Image (cartoon, rainbow, N blue to C red):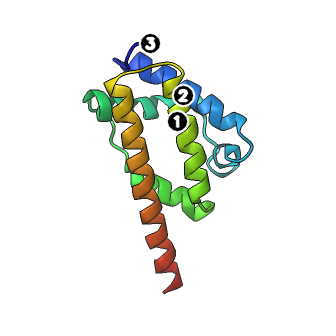
Amino acid sequence: MKDIQNQEDLYEVMNDFYKKLLADEAIRYIFTDVVKIKLEDHLPILVAFWSQSILGTGGYFNNLTQIHLDVNAKSYLSKELFEIWLNHFDAAINENFNGINCERMKNQAHNLSIVMQIKIAKEKEKEKE
């Protein structure tokens, strides 16, 4: 298997990843009921994020943290949901690609998951005050 090398590869991973998420009853509702994403609009944004992060192309300008905090305000993003998300993310990469960019991408996703969970916990603490 080849490594992730370009935006087409990233699109393949993201498309497979979202197929997995949308097929999983435990997490699907976040994307269909809470956020109501339109994949044709969402996938290019995800590809831009990962392309900037992994390939250094630039082009992603959204506030990733705030987006997830906004989703969490609508429906709690639990540790279990992050674990499901990461399992599908890793599988989408591992089933299609292999190499250093793949490992960097998975590591970054796991790091982002931890950061998001910490920020969500801080928001929860603020609400208690």
Kindly identify which residue carries mark 3: 1
Please name the residue that numbered disc 1 is placed on: 89
Instruction: Looking at this view, name the residue that lies furthest to the top.
Output: 1
Measured in 3D between alpha carbons, the distance from the residue under mark 1 to the one under mark 2, in whole angstroms, is 5 Å
Q: Mark on residue 62?
A: none
Crowding around mark 2 (Cα neighbors within 10 Å: few <14, some 14 to 19, many 20+) is many
Which secondary structure, mark 2?
Answer: helix
- Mark 2 to mark 3 CA distance (whole Å): 13 Å
2 or 3: tag closer to the N-terminus: 3
Q: In this view, does 63 lie above or below 4?
A: below
Q: Residue at x 61, y 48 (%)?
A: 35
Answer whether residue 59 is visible to the viewer in this image: no
From the viewer's perspective, is the residue at label 1 or at label 3 nearer?
3
Q: In which quarter of the image is the N terminus?
A: top left
- Give residue 51's position: percent from left, percent from top: 34, 29
Give the x, y percent position of residue 94: 50, 25
Q: Horizontal placement of 127 versus 76: left or right?
A: left
Marks 1/2 in contact by CB < 8 Å: the verdict is yes
For label 2, the residue is 92
User: Which label's residue is closer to the chain start, 1 or 3?
Assistant: 3
Viewer-side residue, 37 vs 92: 92
Name the element at disc 3. loop
Q: Which amino acid does label 3 sit on?
A: Met
What residue is rendered at 50% in x and 34% in y?
90
Residue 89's place in the image compared with 27, above or below, is above
Report if the CB atoms under discs 2 and 3 are less than 8 Å apart. no
Image quadrant in which you'd find residue 87: top right
Instruction: Give me the C-alpha separation between circle 1 and circle 3.
Output: 17 Å
Disc 1 residue crowd, few under 14, some 14–19, many 20+, Cα 10 Å = many
